[in-house]
């Protein structure tokens, strides 16, 4: 699946996107964030406060308990404000 990073998540990780292959035991967004956090210091920094991270699974907003099985793309972004 493709992981896409936006705003300060992207800046902290140092890349816009990447292909990832999480292990089979990673079944939801929460588990995926934990798995990504363990991939290195930059990921740990980007996901240090996972509750503020928003996600979109195949371009539809999702929650942290959403399953990731079959997803082609998961995007991670911080909360946004605007007007």
Image (cartoon, rainbow, N blue to C red):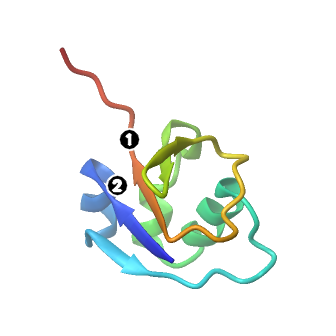
CB within 8 Å, label 2 to label 1: yes
Quarter of the image where one finds residue 12: bottom left
Q: On the picture, is 3 further left or further right than 83?
A: right
Quarter of the image where one finds residue 63: top right
Q: Is residue 61 above or below residue 42?
A: above
Instruction: Kindly state the secondary structure of the residue where label 2 is placed.
Output: helix
Provide the residue designation for mark 2.
Answer: 9
Q: On the picture, is 25 further left or further right than 4?
A: right
Residue name at image x 58 percent, y 67 percent: 71
Q: How far across and down, in percent of the image, does residue 18 sit?
A: 37, 79
User: Dot 1: within a 10 Å radius of its alpha carbon, few (fewer than 14), some, or many (20 or more) residues?
Assistant: some
Q: Return the residue found at the far right.
A: 25
Quarter of the image where one finds residue 19: bottom left
Q: Return the residue found at the far left.
A: 83
Q: How far across and down, in percent of the image, does residue 31 sit?
A: 71, 62
| Front residue (pair 58, 44) | 58
| Front residue (pair 38, 56) | 56
The total number of labels drawn is 2
Label whose residue precedes the other's in the sequence (2 or 1): 2
Q: On the picture, is 82 further left or further right than 12?
A: left
Q: How far across and down, in percent of the image, does residue 26 sit?
A: 74, 71
- The quadrant the C terminus occupies is top left
Residue at mark 2 to residue at mark 1: CA–CA distance: 7 Å
Residue name at image x 65 percent, y 46 percent: 64
| Front residue (pair 49, 53) | 53
Provide the residue designation for mark 1.
Answer: 78
| Front residue (pair 49, 62) | 62
Residue name at image x 39 percent, y 33 percent: 79
Residue name at image x 76 percent, y 66 percent: 27
Q: On the picture, is 52 further left or further right than 28?
A: left
User: Dot 2: within a 10 Å radius of its alpha carbon, few (fewer than 14), some, or many (20 or more) residues?
Assistant: many
Instruction: Kindly state the secondary structure of the residue where label 1 is placed.
Output: loop
């Amino acid at each position: 699946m493709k992981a896409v990073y936006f705003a300060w998540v992207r800046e902290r990780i140092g890349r816009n996107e990447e292909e990832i292959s999480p292990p089979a035991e990673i079944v939801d967004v929460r588990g995926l964030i934990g798995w990504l956090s363990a991939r290195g210091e930059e990921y740990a920094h980007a996901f240090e406060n996972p509750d503020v991270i928003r996600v979109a699974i195949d371009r539809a907003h999702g929650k942290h308990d959403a399953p990731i099985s079959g997803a082609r793309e998961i995007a991670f972004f911080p909360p946004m404000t605007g007007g």
